[in-house]
Image (tube, rainbow, N blue to C red):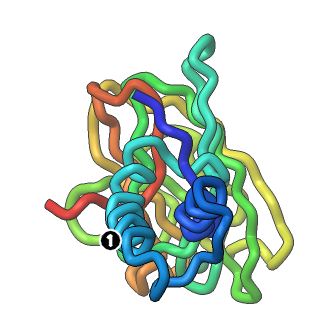
């Protein structure tokens, strides 16, 4: 299944646009209580849709080559706005992964794929998958730097994408990367509550 993922702006605008198209009236909560109800329902279901189909701005997939391209943006102790495992990149077994790392924070950061078992690592230097780390993984790269990690995931497993600068991952700068045999395509979004 594949649903178009509305942007947040589009999600908000959609009920109004529907109301406008059908009735050519304003979009007022007082005048159109049914529109309000529909908007609430849509907002409540949007996170699940995003988790199923991915954030098209962060992840793309080439099925022919089984290649996942993921944009990983370093912010202040977060990745793409998420920290402490609050987001998950889900990929199929044996996927070829291209991570386009973008350093968008004033503090030096790096990236590495670490084990998903045990405690969050204090620093980089022990990647769980060969070649799955950026340059200057312990020192960190300066703001504005970019790097590319290319690696292939195994059949199964749960990993963390961490910052390798000492203390940063433990300080929250990590997200999950999960290999899901049932995944038909990669996705990125908030970690499902278990
Ligand atoms: Cu960092």
Residue at x-position 28% and y-position 26%: 181
Question: Quadrant location of residue 67?
Answer: top right
Residue at x-position 54% and y-position 70%: 163
User: Helix or strand or loop: what does disc 1 sit on?
Assistant: loop
> Is 74 situated left or right of 113 in this image?
right
> Is 44 situated left or right of 108 in this image?
left
Of residues 44 and 79, the one nearer the viewer is: 44
Query: Residue 74's x, y, as percent?
Result: 65, 72
Residue with the mark numbered 1: 120
Q: Is residue 137 visible?
A: no
Q: Is residue 60 visible?
A: yes
Total numbered badges shown on the rendered structure? 1
Asked if ligand 1 lies within 8 A of label 1, the reply is no
Q: Quadrant of the C terminus?
A: bottom left
Q: Quadrant of the N terminus?
A: top left
Query: Residue 169's x, y, as percent?
Result: 44, 76
Query: Residue 89's x, y, as percent?
Result: 44, 49
Residue at x-position 62% and y-position 15%: 65
């Amino acid at each position: 299944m594949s649903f178009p993922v509305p942007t947040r702006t589009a999600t908000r605008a959609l009920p109004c646009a529907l109301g406008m198209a059908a009735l050519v009236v304003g979009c007022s909560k007082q005048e159109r209580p049914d529109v309000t109800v529909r908007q609430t329902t849509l907002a409540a279901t949007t996170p699940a849709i995003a988790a199923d189909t991915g954030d098209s701005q962060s992840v793309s997939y080439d099925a022919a080559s089984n290649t996942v391209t993921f944009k990983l943006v370093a912010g202040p102790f977060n990745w793409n706005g998420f920290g402490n495992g609050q987001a998950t990149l889900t990929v199929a077994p044996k996927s070829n992964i291209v991570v386009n790392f973008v350093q968008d924070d004033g503090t030096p950061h790096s990236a590495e794929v670490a084990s998903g078992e045990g405690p969050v690592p204090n620093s980089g230097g022990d990647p769980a998958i060969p070649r799955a780390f950026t340059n200057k993984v312990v020192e960190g790269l300066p703001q504005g730097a970019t790097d590319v990690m290319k690696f292939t995931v195994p059949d199964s497993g749960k990993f963390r994408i961490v910052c390798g600068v000492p203390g940063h991952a433990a300080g929250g700068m990590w997200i999950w990367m999960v290999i899901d045999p049932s995944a038909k395509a990669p996705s990125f979004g908030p970690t499902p509550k278990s």
